[in-house]
Structure formats: structure tokens, C-alpha cells
């Protein structure tokens, strides 16, 4: 068993980005600029935002955080996004999810200008990605692809099972791996809460690659996978004792895997790296550097 080390891969990708950025700045351009909007003080969001801002520093980007109170109205938030959409000094914007329940998340995602949508959640980018066109690809799914590519994991022709169909992880990764992309051409099965248990087991037990994003600690057990499987654990779950774990029973399952992502230090790090790649793309689009 070998680890798919998200920290190592992300550091390598960010180092490449920072070299490119240094070249752009050397030629007189401003830094790439990411803006993050954080509503309220949700503890996991605070930690995700902190790591995104830190990564901006390492990549040579300007990263700025706009904090809005939990009580902000949807209209006020949309007005803030509109201001950023029209501000040429910002290349990419993230509205950290989840939002308070009085705000409609899809309205907020739809309000972000597609050319600044570095999370890749806007219907325009999602649609373009699904059609195989140039797009900001949803960051976690894109990060998983980059991690598989970094470790030369064969994808083409492999049988891949995705567990969980969220718009931000399960759905996009299943489309991306099935598409005729550079990192794709797998045969993909997308499973979800309505997938009968026996069918889920049939699928996962013959899968070459399993990607799990359900948010349930220990969901993938040793008896669910075959010897030599590649296992991507997207889950981030905080146990009562404060420990951070994924959706895989790591101690029991890891010995059976050829490759597995750790939690922490796996997909989470890659999500942030993918955001950096998307921000650089937004910047290069702005300055016609492509
Ligand atoms: P989500 O929106 O809650 O979606 C979970 C998905 O799992 C849903 O599609 C749900 O099915 C499915 N599901 C739930 N129970 C299931 C079961 N028993 N069998 C099969 N499918 C089941 O979650 P998410 O946003 O995708 O996040 C999932 C996990 O990944 C969470 O732990 C989250 O914190 C983590 N995450 C990590 C990163 C990262 O960067 N590492 C990024 C995003 C999310 P239904 O659609 O039918 O409800």
C-alpha cells in the first residue's frame, strides 16, 4: 500500500504556480488576486478559508478575506458579489459554503461571474466541464484528477465507482473521469443513498478505483473493496474526540489498497491546489496570457 500524498502533490503544484507568477510579476504585471467571502463563523469554514489564504501567499497571489455577519441578507450578499464581479483587480472569487439557512446557495452561486468562478460551481462552468469544453473545473474533483495524474495512476479503461452524488464532488468527478479528458476515459458508476446495498457492494467489490464522498466516518469497510484497489477518500469528518477522519475505515482498508489518500493530507490539500490552478487560469485569461 502506498499513500497518495496530497500535501506533497499540492506543494509541487503550488511551487510551479509561484514560479510562473514570479515571471509575470517580473514582466510588470500585478499579482493574481483571489477574494473569499465568509459569512458567519462556522468553525470548519474558518479553517478551510485559513488554508486557502495561506496557499495564496505560497503561490505569490494576493488573497483577501471579506467577512460578513451571520445575519447578512441574501440581497446584501448578492450586492457584495456584484461589486467583486465588476472589480477588475480581483481574478477569482469564492463564497465559502455552507451559507446560513436563510440564504439560497444556488442563487449565490449563480450570481458569481462565470469568469471569476474559481470553485467551478456556476452552471456555465459546470455545463462547459460536462461538455468537455474549457472551464473552471469544480475544485475538489479537479484536485482528485491532479493527484491521480501526479502519481501516474492509470485511469483510461478502468472501472471507477463514485459513492455520493453531490454537485460539488460526486457528480463532477464522475463526469470528469468518464469524459474523454487527459485524465479520464474510465468506466464510471455513480452511486448514492438510493443505491441498494447489494448493488453498491457488487460495484465497489469489482472497482479498480473507489471515490467516496458521503460524510460518514468508516463508511467504506474492508469487505467492500478488492485487493489492489485505488481508494480516494474525500470525507472530512470531525469525531467527538476532536480527531479528523475520512469516510474510509483507514486502518482496516488501507492494507488492501494499492494506493489510498490519507485524511488529513489527501484530497483536502488538493482542493486548495486546484483553486490556485483555477485562479491562475482566471488571471491568465484576464491578461490574455494563454
Ligand atoms: P453532501 O452534499 O452531503 O453529499 C453526500 C452524498 O452522499 C449525497 O449524494 C448522498 O446521497 C450520499 N450518501 C449519503 N449517505 C449515503 C449512503 N448511505 N450510501 C450512498 N450514498 C450516500 O456531501 P459533500 O459536500 O459531497 O461532502 C461529502 C464529504 O466530503 C463530507 O465529509 C465533506 O466534508 C467532504 N468534503 C471534502 C472536501 C475536500 O476538499 N476534501 C470537499 C468537499 C467535501 P443523496 O444525494 O441521495 O442524499
Image (tube, rainbow, N blue to C red):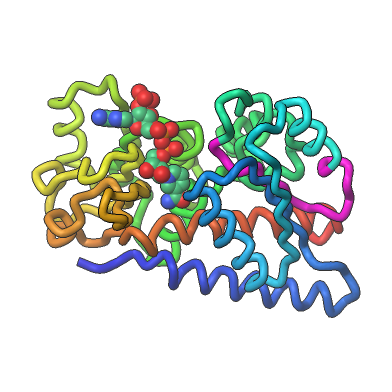
Q: Is residue 15 visible?
A: yes
User: Relative to 132, is 6 on the left or the right?
Assistant: left
User: Relative to 229, is 131 on the left or the right?
Assistant: right
Tell me where the magenta segment starts and ends, as one range: 84-98
Prevailing SS of the magenta stretch: loop
Q: In the image, what residue occupies the spot 57% across and 31% down?
A: 100
111 vs 146, nearest the viewer: 111
Quadrant housing residue 72: top right
Magenta-drawn stretch contains 93: yes
Q: Position of residue 234 (x, y in %)?
A: 37, 48
123 vs 216, nearest the viewer: 216
Q: Quadrant of the N terminus?
A: bottom left
Q: In the image, what residue occupies the spot 14% across and 42% down?
A: 224
Q: Position of residue 251 (x, y in %)?
A: 15, 59
Q: Position of residue 180 (x, y in %)?
A: 49, 42
Magenta-drawn stretch contains 22: no
Q: In the image, what residue occupies the spot 68% across and 40% down?
A: 69
Q: Quadrant of ligand 1?
A: top left
145 vs 139, nearest the viewer: 139
User: Relative to 34, is 126 on the left or the right?
Assistant: left
Amino acid at each position: 500500500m502506498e499513500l497518495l500524498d496530497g500535501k506533497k502533490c499540492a506543494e509541487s503544484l503550488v511551487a510551479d504556480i509561484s514560479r510562473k507568477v514570479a515571471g509575470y510579476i517580473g514582466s510588470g504585471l500585478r499579482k493574481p488576486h483571489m477574494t473569499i467571502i465568509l459569512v458567519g463563523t462556522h468553525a470548519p469554514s474558518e479553517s478551510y478559508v485559513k488554508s486557502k489564504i495561506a496557499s495564496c501567499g505560497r503561490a505569490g497571489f494576493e488573497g483577501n478575506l471579506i467577512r460578513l455577519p451571520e445575519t447578512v441578507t441574501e440581497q446584501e450578499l448578492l450586492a457584495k458579489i456584484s461589486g467583486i464581479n465588476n472589480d477588475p483587480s480581483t481574478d477569482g472569487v469564492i463564497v465559502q459554503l455552507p451559507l446560513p439557512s436563510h440564504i439560497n446557495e444556488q442563487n449565490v452561486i449563480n450570481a458569481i461571474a462565470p469568469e471569476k468562478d474559481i470553485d467551478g460551481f456556476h452552471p456555465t462552468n459546470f455545463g462547459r466541464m460536462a461538455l468537455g469544453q474549457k472551464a473552471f473545473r469544480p475544485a475538489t474533483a479537479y484536485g482528485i484528477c491532479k493527484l491521480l495524474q501526479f502519481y501516474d495512476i492509470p485511469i483510461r479503461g478502468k472501472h471507477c465507482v463514485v459513492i455520493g452524488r453531490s454537485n460539488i464532488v460526486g457528480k463532477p468527478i464522475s463526469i470528469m473521469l468518464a469524459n474523454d479528458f487527459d485524465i479520464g476515459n474510465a468506466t464510471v458508476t455513480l452511486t448514492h443513498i438510493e443505491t441498494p446495498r447489494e448493488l453498491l457492494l457488487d460495484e465497489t467489490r469489482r472497482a479498480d478505483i473507489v471515490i467516496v464522498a458521503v460524510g460518514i466516518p468508516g463508511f467504506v469497510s474492508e469487505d467492500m473493496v478488492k485487493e489492489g484497489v485505488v481508494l480516494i477518500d474525500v470525507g472530512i469528518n470531525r469525531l467527538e474526540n476532536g480527531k479528523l477522519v475520512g469516510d474510509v475505515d483507514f486502518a482496516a482498508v488501507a492494507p488492501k489498497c494499492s494506493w489510498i489518500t490519507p485524511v488529513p493530507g489527501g484530497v483536502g490539500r488538493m482542493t486548495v491546489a486546484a483553486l490556485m490552478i483555477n485562479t491562475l487560469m482566471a488571471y491568465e485569461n484576464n491578461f490574455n496570457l494563454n
